Amino acid sequence: VACIKMHHHSEEEIYNPAIVEKCKSKGVADPFAKIKTDHEKLIEQLNRLLSFRQPIEDGDQKAVDDMKVATKELVTFMEEHLAEEERDYPKIFDACGMTQDEEIALVNKILEKMGLDGNKRFLPPILYAMALWKGKEGMLEWYNLAVPPPIRM
């Protein structure tokens, strides 16, 4: 839950605002209305999952059943959301004229803000997901190109 929240927080606070500024400089409207709405829904779903902890610890079977349903809903929504981002971000970059170097600089800002401890916890799930989407070679290409040396150690 913490990794997903951190991911979407980083998009909302660092990544997307910089892309919006780039878009504005090219006369392109803010392309993130749906993504922002999706992020709000995802945060609500994540908070709902966290709310099951105490009832489950107290032995509430209904909470276990409800958590299973909520988890399936989150996974389904998250898969759809990530597929949309994978489809839409390249189009947004093209429309705004964002270069690969500019995008890498934004990723580096996020990595720097997370610090070593945050990267230690957050980067492995990203690499795993990237390997699933792009294959091991695609993930390693991004890792070697975009992740700064202190984090790669």
Image (cartoon, helix red, strand yellow):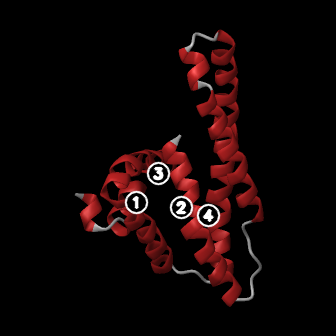
Q: How many marks?
A: 4
What amino acid type is highlighted by mark number 2? Ser
Q: Earlier in the sequence, mark 3 or mark 2?
A: 2
Residue 99 in the image, given as x and y percentages of width and height:
52, 81
The residue positioned 38% from the left and 67% from the top of the image is 112
Disc 2 on helix, strand or loop?
helix
Left or right of residue 60, residue 128 in this image? left
What amino acid type is highlighted by mark number 1? Met
Q: Which residue is mark 1?
A: 114
What amino acid type is highlighted by mark number 4? Glu
Left or right of residue 152, residue 119 in this image? right
Could you give the CA–CA distance between mark 2 and mark 1, rounded to whole angstroms?
9 Å
Residue 71 in the image, given as x and y percentages of width and height:
64, 29
Q: Earlier in the sequence, mark 4 or mark 1?
A: 4
Give the position of the C terminus as an image quadrant. bottom left
Q: Which of labels 3 and 1 is toward the front?
A: 1
Quadrant of res 69: top right
Q: Which residue is mark 4?
A: 12
Whether the residues at callouts 2 and 1 have beta carbons within 8 Å, the answer is yes
Which residue is more in the foreground, 93 or 73?
73
Is disc 1 surrounded by few (<14), some (14 to 19) or many (20+) residues within 10 Å?
A: some
